[in-house]
Image (cartoon, rainbow, N blue to C red):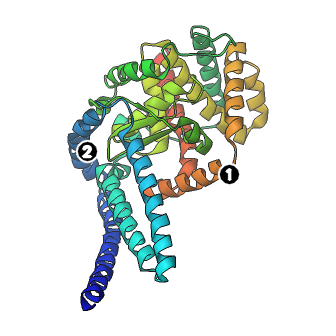
Amino acid sequence: MSFFTDLGAEKKKLAKRRFLYLLLIPAAFLLKWLMSLSPDFTEKYYSRKIYPFIMQPISRFTGIFPFSVAEISVIILVIYFIGQLVSSVRKSISHKKWFFFIDFLSKASIVVSILFFLQTIMWGINYERITFADNAGIVVEKYSVDELEELCTELIMNANALREKVREDNNGIMRVDGGFRSLAKRAHLGYEAAQKKYPFLSGIYGRPKPVILSKLMSYSNIIGMYTGITGEANIDTDIPDMELPSTIMHELAHQRGFAHEDEANFIAYITCMSHPDIDFQYSGAVLALEYSMNALYRIDSERYFRLMENYSPGLMDDLRNQQKYWSQYQGIMKKVANTINDTYLKISGEKDGVQSYGRMVDLLLAEFKINQSINQP
């Protein structure tokens, strides 16, 4: 009888020791804080050396598999822990002791703590590197509404011109021949071209991965997700073809160590525009146009609607199709996912949370002004 009593005591001690793994979470924050004290040091030694040295082999290895290793792992973990939760609750009720439930929580704390710590040290420290603008030598300034309108006008002209060259389906909507698989094979060409101007975008990583549960992912309105532990750029393949190329390039920017959302969006734009294929160029042009026009709408809605009159019929059809698609996925799951994503971004280092996506426009304006000065006689 005493043996079982001792065994119970040992199990309780084990459960308590498991909770010590939670200390990995503040340890991760401490490490990020230390690296934030010197962005130049983080850039030189972590983002340029340690991160690619570790992640490129991991990404190429997971890239061997045609499916997302991260997604399959998450599905297995969720199923396992749901089973464990149900079992622990049943045992706690039948034995009238909550030890079994506490034991479950202790096991879950180990997994959560280790995953968070690994995600941080294997990728999250990239939040503390110097900015893309500093890497590229781009000076970001304050710009007038007139300058924003000029940028939007230029982007509309470019998007209209590219729209005339893309393929359409039977409904007159832009389509990609070969779908996601074709884009995944060709995506690297945009980075190979862009790294001639931005050499810090170089690197050999695994291909982007299709998400099996893409429909479910659409309900969250999160169309791409990078997993720092497996080095995989995971893509919602159910979204309109117009969005696929720029989404892929955005996640590949994360894969190359650029963690901030506004920078990943801008990198998606420049790599799409550097790509030799029209479908990538058009997707990148529309991405930049939507963010710039949204910024203009917030400042001067009259100018926004006036400029919209210059959209070509094909571009308008694609945007209406995009709006129709996303109107299906505006429910409670989106709100929950948005809150979770916002919290994660702020914890990771995005002070503005999901709002940080809008700061891409500053980089677009800076590049626009540089190109204007170059093209002036």
Picture quadrant of residue 242: top right
Gap between marks 1 and 2 measured at Cα: 37 Å
Q: Compared to 130, does 64 lie above or below? A: above
Q: Compared to 184, does 41 lie above or below? A: below
Q: Compared to 236, does 130 lie above or below? A: below
Residue at 42% over, 25% down: 271
Q: Is residue 138 visible?
A: no
Judge by depth and name the residue closer to the eye, 118 or 49.
Answer: 118
User: Within 10 Å of the Cα at label 2, are there few (<14), some (14-19), or many (20+) other Cα atoms?
Assistant: some
- Of the numbered discs in the image, which one, if any, rests on residue 94? none
- Of the numbered discs in the image, which one, if any, rests on residue 51? 2
Judge by depth and name the residue closer to the eye, 187 or 312.
Answer: 187
> What residue did someone put label 1 on?
332
Judge by depth and name the residue closer to the eye, 349 or 217.
Answer: 217
In the displayed orientation, state which residue is furthest to the front. 1
Residue 110 spot, x, y in % from top left? 34, 65
Q: Secondary structure at mark 1?
A: helix
Q: Callout 2, which amino acid?
A: Tyr
Q: Mark 1 against mark 2, which lies toward the viewer?
A: 1
Mark 1 or 2 closer to N-term? Answer: 2
Judge by depth and name the residue closer to the eye, 47 or 303.
Answer: 47
Q: Compared to 276, does 358 lie above or below? A: below
314 sits left or right of 25 in the view? right
Residue at 41% over, 80% down: 99
327 sits left or right of 361 in the view? right
User: Within 10 Å of the Cα at label 1, are there few (<14), some (14-19), or many (20+) other Cα atoms?
Assistant: few
Quadrant location of the N terminus?
Answer: bottom left
Picture quadrant of residue 166: top right
Marks 1 and 2 in Cβ contact (< 8 Å)? no
207 sits left or right of 310 in the view? left
Q: Callout 1, which amino acid?
A: Ile
